Image (tube, rainbow, N blue to C red):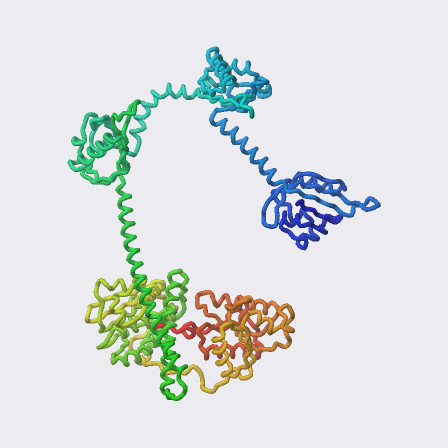
């Protein structure tokens, strides 16, 4: 079981046995060639021992000693170390052999014993108590360290014999002790005595001696052992007790707690100053509870509590009750009453205290209200989750249902128009489902404090016109009029976040159209102040309106104004909450005014900055009335922007492999597919060996890399390829859409970044751009030269 080490003359390990591995955790391969002290010794190893060890080895001598080392797993252990030099025929040292025995348990027991003895001595010193033993056969007495200190005996003299030990006490106490010892020795009788010492014996005057017998296996008494405690202080305390009674009165008067005491009949015997102040009295001695200024109701309650304590002899603790004070105020107090007993245990009265708990009561009430609010919020969350389940399942039903219809069609039942209609239905519901997910992601980022807001120059009026033009299509479809009105001059540009401004306006105007059946929607924009500019955009509709009690719920977490409204009009109830919180992050707010049955006005205010020299635009200076944007196709039919491009697709999902490869091949690319990041690395290395060098020239023009794959993810694969000097563009493909994902991909060595669900046209355009850069000799960069498709394109926002 011992550990054995064979080292060369320079102390480098050549061989270790299995015992070494079990002890240290290091295998032979890990230890070979290393000097033991370099990886086993640590800051806890005794420097003196290390010095002696090294000196012995330098001089060619053997070494035997105990040393503390640390193993591979961090465990510290003690060794009995025996090192012998091994010599050749000429006497030259060729090797050292070390045999190590684990003595950790032995050392730990020794240290534990030392600690226990030290703790015992310390405890005895604190308690002024020592222990002793007496051997009946030899007459030898042994004392602990504390006994020497107690009796003032020089410890260098050793323990006293029995006659000397007896002589420390006065004549009467010595006789009593001698008799007790003899009875114990003869009859095994235990004793406990209070003894007085002679004058001049240490600093102790009174000793409490306790002794027991020790027997052999045959039951014969072989010795005595026991303790001796300095109880001088007890006598002094008894003398000081009378003084403490006087002091008690003073202490009671400075206590913040109110203290009182009564006799068996319930008559006050006294109270401290704080109690008297509350009562507005100079003294309560001789008074009954009904004579106190608390009032009849509290007096009756107090008398009932007094009677219960004294009749049952049980304390009555932490009773909360109102107290009407002499100054007319009412507070809440927590009262404790305990019975007072005489020496015989008979109840002779009671002692009571009380404290003002008014602040605690108020805090408890506030906590209860907070709990009720939390429970209400939890109920709202449950309602929201139920509605969210419906919102998610509704588009999924359409997607799966129409997909099944298309799958079941054998080409005879559905004509081209029906098939196009079904595909359009699947696409629209997919976009709606994506919009719901976007709302949830936005809310998650806001809740976690990770929502970032840009502060850039923004054509605010242009953004508003674009949104109004976009939403006009929906308004016309419902027979509504959507108008944009400018009140006063508006700065041509402001410093704000155009993406979030657009998101808020799409939600506000979209809601106005959704909840309006007849009439129209007016969007009015104005600037409140030219010095501290506040952009005000109001959206007024002639819709159903909102009841007063429901208005603030519109903006609450997981809340909607009315469940019936949700069932009628749909929606998750997240849009307004997200919009208001975005507005507040941008230094503004959203307020609502509404008359049920007549309509609502939602007003967005944004604190903005004006760029230097910005031009003000009057109502007639800008572009004409908002128009619906023209329909644009994602790509030119028949275009093949990736003609001849060799592309490696790393994607583990078979469905995504087929979908992405289809779009890429249709764009002209020659596509190869692997399922893991490791497969991508091997595809670009000589002989398919991931540890080999890269093929030259590269077999592909671009790599489209999913970032979440088994065996080796896209991040690790990109790093591995870049570390080998790969210059082929690597485009990250990820379903993550949170802040920081793009930066993480670029840091891993990717040239570009696009998200799932894919936008085929944008994905193809990004690949074409990256390939074009390489072909034009543009160096790969992880900085701003990479193109990231706008989030609004890659993941369309819901209105």
> Image quadrant for the N terminus?
top right
Residue 622 visible in the snapshot? no
Residue, far left = 296
Q: Quadrant of residue 509?
A: bottom left
Residue, far top = 171
Decide: is 98 above or below 167: below
Residue 615 is situated, as x and y percent measured from the top left of the image, at 35, 73
Residue found at x 75% / y 40%: 61
Decide: is 90 above or below 489: above
Residue 465 is situated, as x and y percent measured from the top left of the image, at 33, 76
Residue 353 is situated, as x and y percent measured from the top left of the image, at 27, 33
> Left or right: 648 with respect to 451?
right
In depth, the one of 38 and 169 nearer the eye is 169
Decide: is 754 above or below 170: below
Decide: is 732 above or below 416: above
Tally of numbered tags: 0
> Left or right: 340 with respect to 103?
left
In depth, the one of 233 and 732 nearer the eye is 233
């Amino acid at each position: 079981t011992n550990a054995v080490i064979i080292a060369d003359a320079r102390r480098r390990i050549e061989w270790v046995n299995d015992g070494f591995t079990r002890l240290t955790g290091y295998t032979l391969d890990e230890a070979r060639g290393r000097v033991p002290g370099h990886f086993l010794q640590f800051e806890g190893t005794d420097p003196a021992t290390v010095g002696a060890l090294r000196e012995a080895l330098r001089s060619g001598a053997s070494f035997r000693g105990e040393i503390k080392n640390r193993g591979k797993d961090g465990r510290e252990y003690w060794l009995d170390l025996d090192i012998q030099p091994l010599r050749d025929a000429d006497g030259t040292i060729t090797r050292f052999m070390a045999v190590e025995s684990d003595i950790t348990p032995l050392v730990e027991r020794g240290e534990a014993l030392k600690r226990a003895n030290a703790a015992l001595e310390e405890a005895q010193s604190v308690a002024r108590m020592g222990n002793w033993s007496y051997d009946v056969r030899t007459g030898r007495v042994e004392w602990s360290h504390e006994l020497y200190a107690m009796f003032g005996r020089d410890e260098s003299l050793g323990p006293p014999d029995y006659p000397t030990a007896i002589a420390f006490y006065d004549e009467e106490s010595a006789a009593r002790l001698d008799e007790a010892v003899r009875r114990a020795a003869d009859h095994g009788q235990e004793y406990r005595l209070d003894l007085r010492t002679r004058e001049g014996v240490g600093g102790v005057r009174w000793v409490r001696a306790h002794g027991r017998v020790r027997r052999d296996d045959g039951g014969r008494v072989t010795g005595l052992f026991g303790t001796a405690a300095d109880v001088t202080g007890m006598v002094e305390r008894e003398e000081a007790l009378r003084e403490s009674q006087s002091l008690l009165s003073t202490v009671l008067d400075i206590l913040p707690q109110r203290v009182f005491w009564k006799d068996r009949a319930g008559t006050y015997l006294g109270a401290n100053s704080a109690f008297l102040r509350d009562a507005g009295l100079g003294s309560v001695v001789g008074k009954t509870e009904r004579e106190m200024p608390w009032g009849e109701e509290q007096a009756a309650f107090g008398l009932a509590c007094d009677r219960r304590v004294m009749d049952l002899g049980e304390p009555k603790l932490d009773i909360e009750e109102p107290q009407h004070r002499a100054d007319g105020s009412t507070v809440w107090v927590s009262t404790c009453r305990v019975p007072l007993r005489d020496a015989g245990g008979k109840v002779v009265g009671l002692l009571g205290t009380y404290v003002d708990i008014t602040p605690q009561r108020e805090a408890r009430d506030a906590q209860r209200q907070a709990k009720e609010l939390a429970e209400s919020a939890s109920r709202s969350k449950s309602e929201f989750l139920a509605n969210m389940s419906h919102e998610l399942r509704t588009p999924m039903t359409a997607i799966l249902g129409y997909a099944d219809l298309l799958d079941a069609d054998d080409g005879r039942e559905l004509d081209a128009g029906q098939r196009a209609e079904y595909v359009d239905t699947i696409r629209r519901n997919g976009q709606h489902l994506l919009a719901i997910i976007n709302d949830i992601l936005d809310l998650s980022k806001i809740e976690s404090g990770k929502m970032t807001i840009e502060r850039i120059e923004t054509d605010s009026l242009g953004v508003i016109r674009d949104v109004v033009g976009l939403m006009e299509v929906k308004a016309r479809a419902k027979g509504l009029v959507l108008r944009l009105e400018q009140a006063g001059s508006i700065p041509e540009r402001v410093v704000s976040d155009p993406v979030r401004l657009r998101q808020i306006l799409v939600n506000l105007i979209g809601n106005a159209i959704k909840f309006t059946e007849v009439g129209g929607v007016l969007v009015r924009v104005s600037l409140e102040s030219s010095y501290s500019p506040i952009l005000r955009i109001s959206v007024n509709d002639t819709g159903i309106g909102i009841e007063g009690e429901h208005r603030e719920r519109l903006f609450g977490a997981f809340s909607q104004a009315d469940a019936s409204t949700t069932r009628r009009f749909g929606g998750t109830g997240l849009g307004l909450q997200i919009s208001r919180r975005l507005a507040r992050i941008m230094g503004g707010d959203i307020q609502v005014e509404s008359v049920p049955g007549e309509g609502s006005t939602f007003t967005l205010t944004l604190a903005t900055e004006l760029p230097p020299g910005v031009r003000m635009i009057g109502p007639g200076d800008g572009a004409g009335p908002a128009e619906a944007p023209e329909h644009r196709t994602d790509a030119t039919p028949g275009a093949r922007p990736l003609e001849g491009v060799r592309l490696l697709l790393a994607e583990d999902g078979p469905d995504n492999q087929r979908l992405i490869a289809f779009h890429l091949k249709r764009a002209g690319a020659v596509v190869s597919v692997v399922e893991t990041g490791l497969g991508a690395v091997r595809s670009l290395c000589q002989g398919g060996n991931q540890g080999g060098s890269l093929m030259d020239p590269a077999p592909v023009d671009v790599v489209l890399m999913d970032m979440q794959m088994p065996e080796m993810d896209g991040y690790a694969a990109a790093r591995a390829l870049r570390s080998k000097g790969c210059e082929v563009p690597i485009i990250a493909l990820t379903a993550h859409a949170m802040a920081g994902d793009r930066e993480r991909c670029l840091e891993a060595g990717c040239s570009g970044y696009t998200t799932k669900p894919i936008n085929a046209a944008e994905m193809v355009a990004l690949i074409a751009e990256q390939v074009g850069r390489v072909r034009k000799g543009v160096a790969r960069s992880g900085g701003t030269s990479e193109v990231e498709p706008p989030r609004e394109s890659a993941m369309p926002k819901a209105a």
